[in-house]
């Protein structure tokens, strides 16, 4: 159980991604209906638009986006990394050009925490130096060491700030270490020495093979304290979540359920299905008979396929609501199985039913 200023979060938990203060296509009521306990919002995007000072002036992010449950904000490090050639990293911070208007910006560990304090999120995450993989050992070490130094600066500044709303933010420190399990373990052990409320495992699924991802995640998780929550950043598929839970991870986020919904993919207990496929044109079946979401209760696959092919916004909303509900139902099942001491059986039985029948997910929108 994770206790935050805006409520308790039963773990393991999945956080839908509300990049710009909104989970695309879903209202706060939709998210509550899906079983969502906690959302993720993005420091980088909200810093640029509408600006953290605007959000603070309006009472903080919870009031701004009409969400009264917990919010975690990431530090902006991964989004800056994704800008690639537009970024210049130094010891002081990261210089980059805004993807909105090309304006020159500078994000330091201190500014990242200042922005997150303005937002008033329940959980703020320290700035890290994320790097793509594969990468040479010297560069991996350099990024890991810089992340340690930035973590210290981030935490120091965060403790000086008054978050919007007045409640103390929980502080999570990010573990880096590139593609070397030994370095990951070392960085996790050193990060564990910081006085913070939890830890995030970052810099995964950035070019390495899946088997490497899990070796790196395990190396980090095993070196982190068991008495504080562990957050695996940016992953993943339903099977990824189950694997992560087995590694000892408590929190997850990923854009897959929302992004793939916009491209016509629905997650089901038997595996993902592509609503665009002709086999669904005359189907009266729901997306997933075991799902309690509005789309599955009221709408057929044939109707949802029609909406998607016609470009109707309702298709995006219904598929997104279904996918987020599916992920939350998966997490609720995992929590119950853990309470009964039957988690490995639960994960095995789910994996035996679940098949990637439609191959790779559609290309991102």
Image (cartoon, rainbow, N blue to C red):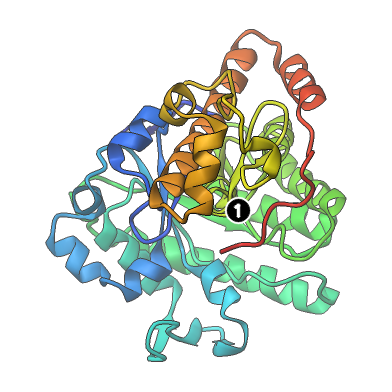
Relative to 157, is 344 above or below? above
Image location (x, y in percent) of residue 354: 76, 29
Relative to 63, is 251 above or below? above
Q: Horizontal placement of 195 versus 82: left or right?
A: left
**Is disc 1 surrounded by few (<14), some (14 to 19) or many (20+) residues within 10 Å?**
some
Residue displayed at 47% across by 67% down: 76
Q: Quadrant of residue 50?
A: bottom left
Q: Which of 305 and 164 is in front in this view?
A: 305
Any part of residue 189 in sight = yes
* Residue position marked by numbered label 1 in the rendering: 234
Relative to 294, is 93 above or below? below
Q: Horizontal placement of 64 versus 126: left or right?
A: left
Relative to 264, is 75 above or below? below
Residue displayed at 58% across by 54% down: 263
Image location (x, y in percent) of residue 324: 50, 37
Q: Quadrant of residue 84?
A: bottom right
Identity of the residue furthest to the front in this view:
282
Identity of the residue furthest to the top in this view:
340
Q: What element carries label 1?
A: loop
Q: Nearer the viewer, residue 248 or 236?
A: 236
Q: Nearer the viewer, residue 298 or 63?
A: 298
Give the quadrant of the C terminus.
Answer: bottom right
Q: Horizontal placement of 234 versus 57: left or right?
A: right
Residue displayed at 79% across by 21% down: 348
Task: State how many labels appear.
Answer: 1
Image location (x, y in percent) of residue 320: 48, 43
Image location (x, y in percent) of residue 136: 84, 77
Any part of residue 193 in sight = no
């Amino acid at each position: 159980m994770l206790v935050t200023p805006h409520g308790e979060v039963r773990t393991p938990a999945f956080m839908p991604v509300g990049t710009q203060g909104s989970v695309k296509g879903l209202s706060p009521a939709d998210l509550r209906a899906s079983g969502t306990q906690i959302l993720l919002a993005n420091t980088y995007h909200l810093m640029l638009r509408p600006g953290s000072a605007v959000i603070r002036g309006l009472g903080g992010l919870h009031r701004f986006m009409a969400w009264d449950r917990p919010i975690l904000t990431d530090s902006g490090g991964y989004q800056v990394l994704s800008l690639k050639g537009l970024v210049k990293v130094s010891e002081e911070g990261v210089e980059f050009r805004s993807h909105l208007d090309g304006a020159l910006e500078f994000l330091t560990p201190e500014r990242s925490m200042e922005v997150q304090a303005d937002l008033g999120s329940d959980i703020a995450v320290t700035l890290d130096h994320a790097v793509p993989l594969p990468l040479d050992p010297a560069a991996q070490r350099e990024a890991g060491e810089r992340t340690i130094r930035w973590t210290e600066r981030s935490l120091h500044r965060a403790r000086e700030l008054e978050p919007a709303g007045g409640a103390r933010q929980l502080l999570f420190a990010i573990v880096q270490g590139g593609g070397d399990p030994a370095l990951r373990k070392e960085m996790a052990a050193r990060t564990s020495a910081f006085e913070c409320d939890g830890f995030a495992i970052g810099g995964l699924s950035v070019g390495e093979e899946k088997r490497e991802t899990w070796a790196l995640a395990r190396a980090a998780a095993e070196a982190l304290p068991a008495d504080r929550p562990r957050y695996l950043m940016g992953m993943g598929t339903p099977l990824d979540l189950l694997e992560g839970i087995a590694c000892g991870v408590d929190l997850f986020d990923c854009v897959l359920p929302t992004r793939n919904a916009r491209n016509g993919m629905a997650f089901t207990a038997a595996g993902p299905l592509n609503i665009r496929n002709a086999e669904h044109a005359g189907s009266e079946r729901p997306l997933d008979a075991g799902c309690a979401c509005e789309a599955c209760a009221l709408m057929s696959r044939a109707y949802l396929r029609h909406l998607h092919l016609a470009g109707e916004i309702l298709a995006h909303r219904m598929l997104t609501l279904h996918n987020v509900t599916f992920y939350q139902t998966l997490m609720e099942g995992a929590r119950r199985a853990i309470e009964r001491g039957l988690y490995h059986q639960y994960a095995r039985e789910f994996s035996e039913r679940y098949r990637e029948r439609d191959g790779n997910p559609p290309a991102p929108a």
